[in-house]
Image: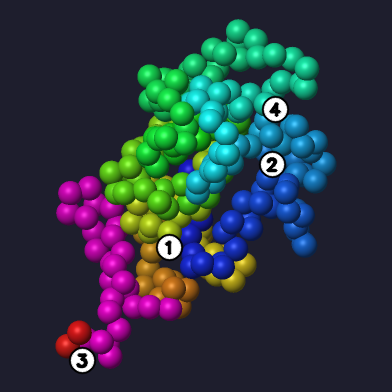
Amino acid sequence: MLALLGPNGAGKSTLLRAITGRLRAAAGTVRLFGRDVRHLPAAERSRLVSLVPQQIEVPMAFTVEQMVLMGRTAALNRWRAPSPADRRIVEQAMAYTDVLELRERLFNEMSGGERQRVVIALALAAEPRLILLDEPTAHLDMNHRLEVLELIARLNAERGVAIVMVAHDLNLAAEFFPRLVILERGRVAADGPPGAVLRPETLEPVYRCRVSLHRDPDGGALRVFPRRAERLTAAGS
């Protein structure tokens, strides 16, 4: 479980594209489970890695079940219809993400939180070893953010799926992820557990604002708060 943090333009989404092999690295090597991503056929990369974007636009009226079935695309050749085994995998993915009872609902008519669970089910149906998530909670309210992150943590703990997630919410990242990586202008500014990474001397030059850190008195998780600029405080704003 690894969270990629950093300001806009730091290179987080670019890194995800490099991991999937969709973007060739200008230097260095990207390895997926010990193998150079450049030498992996696209179909094999699709079986190893699933990507969950911020949001997905679907121009046609697909049901939830049809959406999740698309996750089996990499496992099917062009001419083979889904087998009973494929259907079982799809069913399990929907059950695991709590969308099984919504299987006949149209995807485009669902709430943001429901859609995101469907997209995670789609990713899970591919049976990947790694799931990449690009700000999956960006457009969700705090309750649905919590639901999505709890689901991601379960996938890691119970299914053994590796998770790399781009996030802007430092507090949720600190609560759910044992390893944080902060990027700044394409370089790694910090890498380690939350207590080692979330420090004012690290965060302030990267985010260009003053911050305060506190421990949650209930769970003990770190909490990061931006501080208002001194000039605004002095003006009584």
Q: In the rendered structure, does residue 145 fall within the stretch colored magenta?
A: no
- Sequence-first disc among 4 and 1: 4
- Sequence-first disc among 3 and 4: 4
Gap in angstroms between the C-alphas marked 1 and 3: 33 Å
Which residue, given by chain and number where applicable, does mark 3 sit on?
Answer: 235
Which residue, given by chain and number where applicable, does mark 2 sit on?
Answer: 32
Q: Which mark is residue 74?
A: 4
Q: Position of residue 114 (x, y in %)?
A: 39, 35
From the viewer's side, name the closer residue of 213 and 42. Answer: 42
Tell me the SS state at disc 4: helix
Which residue, given by chain and number where applicable, does mark 1 sit on?
Answer: 197
- Sequence-first disc among 2 and 4: 2
- Sequence-first disc among 1 and 2: 2
Gap in angstroms between the C-alphas marked 4 and 1: 37 Å
Gap in angstroms between the C-alphas marked 1 and 2: 25 Å
Q: Which mark is residue 65?
A: none
The image shows residue 57, relative to residue 73, as above or below, that is below
Q: Name the quadrant of the C terminus.
A: bottom left
State the image quarter where residue 168 is shown: bottom left
